[in-house]
Image (spheres, rainbow, N blue to C red):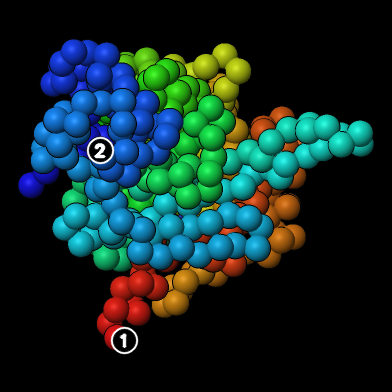
Amino acid sequence: MKKIIQDLSKEELSACIKPAFRAKQIYHWVYHKYASSFEEMKNLPKEMRETLATTYTLSPLKQVMVQDSKDGSRKYLYELHDGHTVEAVLLLMKDKVYHEDGTLKHQERYTVCISSQVGCKVGCAFCLTAKGGFMRNLTAGEIVEQVRLIKKDKHIDANRRVNIVYMGMGEPLDNLEAVVKSVKIFADEEGMAIATHRQTISTSGLSTKIEKLGKMELGINLAISLHAVDDALRQQLMPINKAYNIASIINAVKHFPVNDRKRVMFEYLVIKDVNDDISAAKKLLSLLDGIKAKVNLIYFNPYGGSTFKRPSVEDMQMFQSYLTSRGLHCTIRESKGLDISAACGQLREQALEGAKDA
Ligand code: SAH
Ligand code: SF4
């Protein structure tokens, strides 16, 4: 089987391909010109292009489905070489804005939400990705390729910065090595140049891995999927809480290096009549005391067969204002792409269902 060229860092590529400047040229073709074949790389000698094509592939992912949302977000389903599928979502965070005189004020702002595994071992009760179980880890190249293909698809210029969130399918810290490698490949100045402070890893709270990630001092942002403030409830929602309880997560976060201008994000999935009462908000406030934190409230996104319910707008706002009025930064996540079911795993599920019907 051919090797995935996106699995290689620039240094690794330089070690394989001589002279070293050729590696830089290839990197440029891959990440700036979004090449899909070695044949296109016209400034490389023909012989080299042919040898590369026999050793490497540039296409580890094949787009099999897309869905557009009214709000400008687009969701992609990709097939891997072994037939498994993963999702990635392009989120339009801000539209292009012009000044009154017609000059450009700012470009569109994009965030790409990417997957790190096929399925997930963590098994959260509210998550569709968990339902299909765990298949395998993605390689660094399979992670990187999601962003490269999306930038290519949307004609996003190589110099335009996008943000990255590891919030698609899978638990990124359960695939730490490949995820960290992808973070570094994204950040390479001669590649996509997406600085680590533009990348966020979201985790269900593998405390020991949070500590390990922190020690690497990558400058990456951290998001914790907390979702409950007492261990009994959290354990029901997220079985991983048996191994890593709330106290261990808070302790790990306290050791995590946070950029001066940033905060650790605590995601709190609000489920109607499960964790949406004000006493939970009160406990959350005391739990996060002394941490440079911000809270992001997420509406539970229902899917076929789920027993949980979406909270009302009023309940969400009450929860939020309890926290903000006491000085905690708290936002409500806009349900970007809700009409295309943006919560992870939902497009894949639809495709699998479709395949069953066919
Ligand atoms: N495994 C990591 C990252 C992927 S999940 C983690 O759990 O943090 C990304 C986010 O999607 C998590 O905060 C998760 O709680 C949320 N999510 C899962 N199912 C959801 C649903 N049905 N509705 C809304 N958000 C959901
Ligand atoms: Fe895995 Fe995250 Fe889904 Fe939990 S919410 S099952 S950790 S992907």
Looking at the rendered image, the quarter that the C terminus falls into is bottom left
Horizontal side of 261 relative to 200 (left or right) equals right
The span from disc 2 to disc 1 (Cα, nearest Å) is 38 Å
Residue occupying the point 72% across, 41% down:
96
Examine the rendered structure and indicate whether residue 127 appears above or below residue 47: below
Farthest bottom residue in view: 357
Residue 333 location (% of width, % of height): 62, 49
Element carrying mark 1: helix
Of residues 35 and 290, the one nearer the viewer is 35
Q: Which callout, 2 or 1, points to the residue nearer the camera?
A: 2
When asked about the image quadrant of residue 25, the answer is top left
Q: Residues within 10 Å of mark 1 (few under 14, many from 20)?
A: few
Q: Is residue 315 visible?
A: yes
Q: Amino acid at mark 1?
A: Asp
Residue 158 location (% of width, % of height): 49, 31
Q: Is mark 1 within 8 Å of ligand 1?
A: no
Determine which of the numbered discs, if any, sits on residue 357 in the image: 1
For marks 2 and 1 on the same chain, the one whose residue lies earlier in the sequence? 2
